């Protein structure tokens, strides 16, 4: 090796290189035509400033006070009139905010008028969905019907699964990781750095050792780094979070490659537990041709999805499915309920199963397939429009999340309710987002960028490190 180095140095002919001039100053800053590299920074009046995490407004400044009724309110009706006016203004604001909603994965186009007749009941599915408690005002029959539908979707027989309808996607993740921890009390949790924050919250809550795994530029887990991390703990079982669509970039971890990496690292199927976080794309991927399968025929332990995202429920909810054999490690009988406790929460929203059951029956597999196709088609349209406008953008395969340069104006970001991280933002194209709305967004973005970058006098930052060289349209990468 040393000989080859000598040859290389001789070929460079360093002895013919002229020495540096005596007045050379190595600290001199040379102005060149390269664009600024976006590293946690933003432009303020043409000057690059460190970027701070911008939090939302303090709601205490706009909160609606709760006051005691006056003695004569029942007679005058003034309080009822006041509350009606407050609610009317609130509804108007919701209509306006819904018009400009692009950054979060919520399906906002739905009609559940048929279920309004049930809103007068306090429906609570406390306890195990499969064991009726003494509280009779429940919707377990609807809940189990929904769970059966998802079990079929993920290829798990009725007598082999257990699950429940959660209050949100985070609860599904908390439950999935908890089941893994109960199966393997000394297990190490592995999750990619682009996993949802609830995964790392679970690690803190359950006092688990956690290895954060690097990702590829797409946001997908880097299985080479995963293998390296596994080699550090070969003596302990592995609990793995696999992302079926990452939060920011919509990247889908390669489940088959994750399993192969575990096997090649010496982990037999009885020494690892895989939880699949499918918050949004877990319900979209089954309807995409040639997409890899999330299936319990593979050695996975649990899958969770959100119900208020692609399905479109008016309240946060989700679905968590695991293998029946695993739940015994977690469950306890509760005499007070006359049921079994195996869920994260005690009381559970009994209305959510009704909304999920109603939507699944109305749309069915074909209805969801049409909506998935619409989302993917519109996402490609948005990415194309951004690229044509000279805006760096990325769209992962199997995804409806379009990632692009972060807007320089927080007012614009708040108007369109964009989700941002570092120097990138994203739009999640959902079934309620049509071409007209995407055109309005892009047209306004183009107008605002002309102001931010003074019609081309200032250069937009390089975001190649976050979305890849081929997607960055800065002066260096756009030839």
Image (cartoon, rainbow, N blue to C red):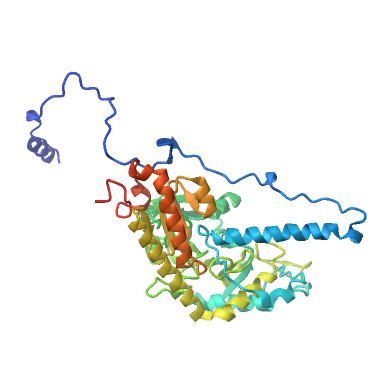
Q: Which of 179 and 469 is in front in this view?
A: 469
Residue 247 visible: yes
Residue 216 located left or right of residue 312: left
Q: Where is residue 406 in the image (x, y as percent from the top left)?
A: 43, 49
Up-down: is 163 above or below 37?
below
Q: Which image quadrant is residue 286 in? A: bottom left
Q: Which of 99 and 245 is in front in this view?
A: 99
Pinpoint residue 428: horizontal percent, then vertical percent: 48, 61
Quarter location, residue 457 = top left
Quadrant in the picture for the N terminus: top left
From the viewer's perspective, is 1 left or right of 65?
left
Q: Position of residue 198 (x, y in %)?
A: 55, 54
Foreground residue among 388 and 207: 388
| Residue drawn at the location 89% of the way across and 59% of the way down | 76
Compared with residue 137, is residue 469 higher up or lower down, i.e. above or below? Answer: above
Residue 157 at x, y percent in the picture:
54, 79
Q: Which residue is drawn at 48% across and 57% down?
A: 247
Q: Is residue 245 visible?
A: no
Query: Which residue: 42% across, 72% down?
Result: 293
For the residue pair 355 and 128, the one nearer the viewer reads as 355
How many numbered marks are there?
0
> Which of the 4 quarters of the picture holds residue 356?
bottom right
What's the residue at 35%, 62% (across, down)?
Answer: 384
Which residue is at the far top?
Answer: 22
Image vertical order of residue 94 relative to residue 38, above or below: below
């Amino acid at each position: 090796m040393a000989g080859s180095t000598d040859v290389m140095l001789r070929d460079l002919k360093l002895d013919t290189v002229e020495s540096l001039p005596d007045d050379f100053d190595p600290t001199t800053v040379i102005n060149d035509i390269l664009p600024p590299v976006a590293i946690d920074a933003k432009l303020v009046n043409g000057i690059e400033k460190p970027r701070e995490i911008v939090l939302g407004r303090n709601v205490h400044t706009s909160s609606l006070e709760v006051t005691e009724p006056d003695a004569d309110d029942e007679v005058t009706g003034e309080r009822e009139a006041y509350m009606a006016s407050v609610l009317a203004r609130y509804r108007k604001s919701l209509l306006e905010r819904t018009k400009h909603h692009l950054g979060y994965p919520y399906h906002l186009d739905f009609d559940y008028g048929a279920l309004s007749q049930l809103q007068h009941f306090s429906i609570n599915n406390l306890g195990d969905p499969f064991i009726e408690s003494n509280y009779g005002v429940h919707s377990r029959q609807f809940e189990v019907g929904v769970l059966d539908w998802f079990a079929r979707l993920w290829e798990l027989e009725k007598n082999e699964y257990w699950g429940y309808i959660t209050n949100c996607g985070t609860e599904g993740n908390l439950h999935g990781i908890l089941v893994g921890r109960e199966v393997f009390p000394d297990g190490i949790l592995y999750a990619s750095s682009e996993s949802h924050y609830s995964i790392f919250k679970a690690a803190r809550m359950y006092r688990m050792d956690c290895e954060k795994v690097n990702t590829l530029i797409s946001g997908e887990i880097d299985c080479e780094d995963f293998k390296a991390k596994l080699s550090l703990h070969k003596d302990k079982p592995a609990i793995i979070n696999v992302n079926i669509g990452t939060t920011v970039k919509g990247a889908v971890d390669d489940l088959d490659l994750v399993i192969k990496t575990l096997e090649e690292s010496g982990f037999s199927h009885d020494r690892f537990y895989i939880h699949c976080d499918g918050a949004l794309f877990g319900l979209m991927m089954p309807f995409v041709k040639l997409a890899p399968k999330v299936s319990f025929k593979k050695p996975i332990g649990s899958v969770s999805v959100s119900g208020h995202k692609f399905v479109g429920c008016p309240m946060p909810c989700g679905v968590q499915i695991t293998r029946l054999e695993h739940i015994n490690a977690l469950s306890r009988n509760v005499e007070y309920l006359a049921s079994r406790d195996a869920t994260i929460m005690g009381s559970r929203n009994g209305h959510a199963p009704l909304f999920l059951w109603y939507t699944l029956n109305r749309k069915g597999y074909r209805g969801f397939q049409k909506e998935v196709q619409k989302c993917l088609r519109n996402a490609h349209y948005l990415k194309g429009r951004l690229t044509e406008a000279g805006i760096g953008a990325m769209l992962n395969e199997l995804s409806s999340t379009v990632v692009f340069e972060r807007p320089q104006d927080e007012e614009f970001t708040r108007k369109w309710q964009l989700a941002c991280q570092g120097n990138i933002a994203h739009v999640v194209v959902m079934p309620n987002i049509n071409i007209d709305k995407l055109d309005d967004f892009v047209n306004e973005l183009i107008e605002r960028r002309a102001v931010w970058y003074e019609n081309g006098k200032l250069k937009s930052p390089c975001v190649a490190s976050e979305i890849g060289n081929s997607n960055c349209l800065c002066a260096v990468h756009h030839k």
